[in-house]
């Protein structure tokens, strides 16, 4: 019976499967590098389990999981609100066709060589600011380009430079509050507002800079570097984990491993 069903597969069914795969792939690309990817995978897993128990005619589990699936659309809207907003903004932008011209469905053609982070300039700037006890919060984007957080700050659009970073975080600078966000080899924006983590394991003597660093790395695949104004030390944060008292060589080695 099962084999008979396979042999009666229509062309429309094949197209249906292909379109579904493309949509799932695009959703995955949208949320990868963010905390939402785990929720997305969890929802897919629940749906697959629901179909399995339904096929096995397990009435109780089918009923319970069916109720869960029935409110899944509302849950998706709530959970993926920032990502949905970002997609709608892209669709409404007339430049979307131009920005996507190197893309054909889910195959991406990269014509340019990838730009590497200028690690040396970032590390030296952090070392100088630590020596001067100048507080700083630098966020380095990876796959997730943090567009929704860049929008909250002041656009800079400058090549990475130690002088620019030190100038931004100089205590009398109007841009020193908030975070600098770096994408590729560019300082995209300064004075950016980041989500603050409520994780109880963060030491109580750390302030909002450290909590914001943990918060942004909990919600994305970004790396956050913190220079303490009070202690003059360097810390960095990745995947929601805070690495304290890092030497310039520790920071350099970590960034080398991430970007090289």
Image: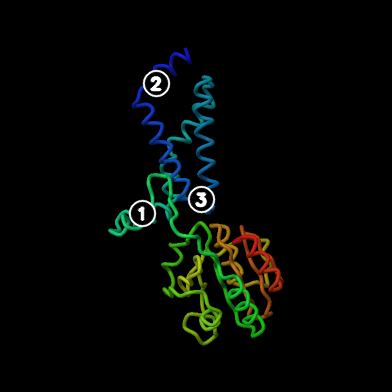
Residue 178, position in %: x, y? 51, 74
Quadrant holding the C terminus: bottom right
The front one of 139 and 218 is 139
182 shown above or below 103: below
Q: How is the image coloured?
A: rainbow
Q: Of marks 1 and 3, which one's residue comes earlier in the chain?
A: 3
Q: Of marks 2 and 1, which one's residue comes earlier in the chain?
A: 2
Residue at the spot x=68%, y=76% of the render? 233
Mark 2 or 1: in front is 1
Check residue 112 in the rendering and tell me which mark sits there, or answer none: none
Q: CA distance from mark 2 to mark 1?
A: 34 Å
Q: Residues within 10 Å of mark 3 (few under 14, many from 20)?
A: some
Asked whether, in this view, residue 173 is left or right of residue 123, the answer is left
Residue 109, position in %: x, y? 43, 51
Asked whether, in this view, residue 17 is left or right of residue 221, the answer is left
Q: Which residue is mark 3?
A: 32
Where, by quadrant of the figure, is residue 154 drawn? bottom left
Residue at the spot x=61%, y=82% of the render? 134
The front one of 22 and 74 is 22
Q: Which residue is mark 2?
A: 9
Q: Which residue is mark 1?
A: 100
Q: Of marks 2 and 3, which one's residue comes earlier in the chain?
A: 2
Mark 2 or 3: in front is 2
User: Looking at this rendering, what residue extends furthest in the left direction?
Assistant: 94
Q: Describe the element under mark 2 as helix, strand or loop.
A: loop
Q: Residues within 10 Å of mark 2 (few under 14, many from 20)?
A: few
Q: CA distance from mark 2 to mark 3?
A: 33 Å
Q: CA distance from mark 1 to mark 3?
A: 18 Å
């Amino acid at each position: 019976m099962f084999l008979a069903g396979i042999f009666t597969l229509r062309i429309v069914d094949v197209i249906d499967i292909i379109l579904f795969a493309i949509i799932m792939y695009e959703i995955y690309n949208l949320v990868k590098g963010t905390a939402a990817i785990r929720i997305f995978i969890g929802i897919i897993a629940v749906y697959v389990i629901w179909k399995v128990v339904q096929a096995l005619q397990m009435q109780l589990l089918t009923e319970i999981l069916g109720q869960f699936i029935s409110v899944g659309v509302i849950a998706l809207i709530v959970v993926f609100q920032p990502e949905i907003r970002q997609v709608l903004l892209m669709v409404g932008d007339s430049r979307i066709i131009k920005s996507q011209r190197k893309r054909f469905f889910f195959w991406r053609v990269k014509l340019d060589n990838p730009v590497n982070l200028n690690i040396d300039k970032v590390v030296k700037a952090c070392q100088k600011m630590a020596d001067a006890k100048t507080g700083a919060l630098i966020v380095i984007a990876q796959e997730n380009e943090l567009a929704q957080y860049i929008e909250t700050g002041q656009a800079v659009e400058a090549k990475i430079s130690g002088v620019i970073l030190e100038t931004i975080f100089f205590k009398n600078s109007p841009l020193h509050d908030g975070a600098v966000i770096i994408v590729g080899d560019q300082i995209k924006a300064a004075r950016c507002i980041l989500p603050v983590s409520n994780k109880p394991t963060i030491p109580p003597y750390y302030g909002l800079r450290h909590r914001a660093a943990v918060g942004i790395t909990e919600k994305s695949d970004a790396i956050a570097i913190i220079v303490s104004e009070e202690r003059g030390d360097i810390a960095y944060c990745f995947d929601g984990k805070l690495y304290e008292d890092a030497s310039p060589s520790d920071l350099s080695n970590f960034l080398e491993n991430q970007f090289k």
